[in-house]
Amino acid sequence: MNMAFDVKRIREDFPNLAAQGRDAKPIVYFDNAATTFKPCQVIALTHSHYCHRTANIHRGVHYLSEVATAEYESTREKVRRFLNARSLSEIIFTKGATESINLVAASYGRKFLKSGDEVIISQMEHHSNIVPWQMLREETGCVLRVVPISDAGELMLDEYRKLLGPRTKLVAMVHVSNSLGTVNPVKDIIKEAHSAGAVVLIDAAQGVTHEPVDVQLWDADFVVFSGHKMFGPTGVGVLYGKERLLESMPPYQGGGDMILSVDFDKTIYNRLPHKFEAGTPNVAGVIGLGAAIDYMNSLSWAEVIDYKKDLLQHGTKLLSTIPDLRMIGSATEKAPIFSFTLRDIHAHDIGTLLDREGFAIRTGHHCTQPVMKRFGIPATSRASLAFYNTREELEAFAVALKKVVEVFK
Amino acid sequence: MTDTSGTAGHGRDIDELYQQVIIEHNRHPRNFGALEPHTHRAEGYNPLCGDHLFVSLNIDEQGTIQAVSFEGDGCAISKASASLMTMALKGKKIEEARMLFDEFRRLILKEMDAAREPNHLGKLTVFSGVWKYPSRVKCAILAWHTMKGALDNAKTVSTE
Ligand SMILES: Cc1ncc(COP(=O)(O)O)c(C=O)c1O
């Protein structure tokens, strides 16, 4: 185990880790794919914004508005660096990954996709990367193509290559699967799509906490993620888009801030990135997201990656000792997400019994019903770990699972 | 040494929810399968967790439930609840079935204290701990809503 990563120290930054569950039992939080806990730094900055610097942004001449605007815009610079984007114009704040995908589908999709054009997604997409494309299909008559996944839960790249063709206009693919843990070869996926002349959207909602995202290295056209899954506040997310593409796209919503001038005859839209940020944004949320990025930057990626790899290996080994536990998703490249079925015990019974022991896991289809269908199961139980989880928690988890089996014996 | 940290030391609450009766009915559900002939039938669906079942009743001209069955799939709570419901309803009048529905609903929402208030629940009080798990109340009541739907001639019932 990597000793350089001081998990005990790190855990002190997350007050929610001390939360108590039913009957005042300490909680082991294994639901990080749903949302992560927030470090004190994020909580403190959001709090102090509301205590001392509340103001609307971009439209005040007064001091507080200037301060809030500067903080808001400095977060855009933090995000730019976090993603290694070329320009601030490429960073759009949204309310989350879902809204970012909808923005691209509604704005880029409606303008550039015609009947018969093809959008390629995969069988492991989150519903948020399926439904907006289906809505676009209804409107434009474009065709949705789906890359299948293997028994291990890996993308079948040969099938992907076969689907790519002159009709492919857009590829929308998940970076790290929230229900399988699979890490997809994003760079190759993008390269192949570009050879076919398609643009690529990457859903990095789970990916941003797994490994550094470098949009230039990837050559990604669009990247989306949510703040709340990367230790930031809820209600804030990001759309990265190549400037050239964003320039060519019509606004997604109309309102204040996205315009330069309004007249009943003619309205002139604002420049990027403001063109896509209509209305008062989640100012405190964006500022909190900045603190989350600062927090992640204060850690060493190499250490975090090593530590999480150890959690993955240790957890995989422990769970393999539980009779009749079937792991759903065993990709070679995988995040510490354990999705499984246990004998014929219904996932909700597992979830309730584990909850009683203090474990917060998620049960159900995890907004990935096609994945459940692919594996012929109605639901899984899912433990998803963050860097503040520990080997000891995993060991206690394995013991608790054995108790679940006992109850149903 | 004996290990008491297993099922015995599990804590009373969980034993209240996953009582042996419930585990047993989950494993060997009673009146499970199609019912022919039947006079009433409805489909119940809990979109939140995918629990899905059918309840069929055969009611004679005097309004007595001669037979009742359920089919489908769900968690232990929903299956055991359906199984115990079929046992409780057999031989009852329609009005009695409706009254039991109401008592059961009040029980699992903690609107009734079965130990103090007179009621007709009998064995069904094994579900008295469900209210502590709000996310599971729908599992316990699905079969009952479906049964009521069948009496009201509804085709499908959803707990959403
Ligand atoms: C892979 C993936 N994509 C997209 C989303 C949607 O994120 P949000 O609900 O924050 O918009 C999620 C959330 O579960 C996810 O796991």
Image (cartoon, rainbow, N blue to C red):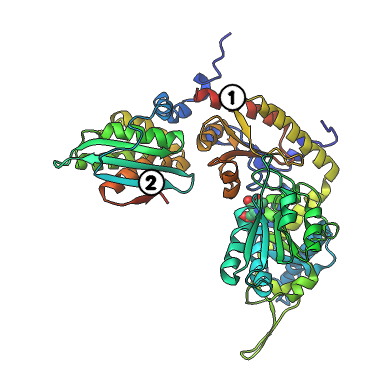
Q: Residue at x 74, y 35 (%)?
A: A312
Q: Is residue A211 visible?
A: yes
Measured along the vertical axis of the image, is residue A310 above or below residue A245?
Answer: above
Q: Residue furthest bottom?
A: A265
Question: In x, y percent, where is residue B92?
Answer: 21, 36
Relative horizontal placement of residue B140, taking residue A3 as reference (left or right): left
The residue singled out by tag 1 in the image is A402
Identified by mark 2, the residue type is Gly
Q: Nearer the viewer, residue A209 or A151?
A: A151
The residue singled out by tag 2 in the image is B44
Q: Residue furthest top?
A: B1
Q: Secondary structure at mark 1?
A: helix
For label 2, the crowd category at 10 Å Cα-Cα, with few meaning under 14, some 14 to 19 and many 20 or more, is many
Q: Secondary structure at mark 2?
A: strand
Q: Which quarter of the picture shows residue A280? A: bottom right
Question: In x, y percent, where is residue A349?
Answer: 50, 34
Q: Nearer the viewer, residue A33 or A113?
A: A113
Q: Is residue A233 visible?
A: no
Identified by mark 1, the residue type is Lys
Which chain is disc 1 placed on? A
Question: In x, y percent, where is residue B101?
Answer: 29, 41
Q: Residue furthest left?
A: B62
Relative horizontal placement of residue A162, taking residue B142 as reference (left or right): right
Looking at the rendered image, the quarter that the N terminus of chain A falls into is top right
Q: Residue at x 79, y 48 (%)?
A: A211
How far, Cα to Cα, is label 1 from label 2?
32 Å
Q: Which quarter of the picture shows residue A195? A: bottom right
Relative horizontal placement of residue A141, taking residue B124 as reference (left or right): right
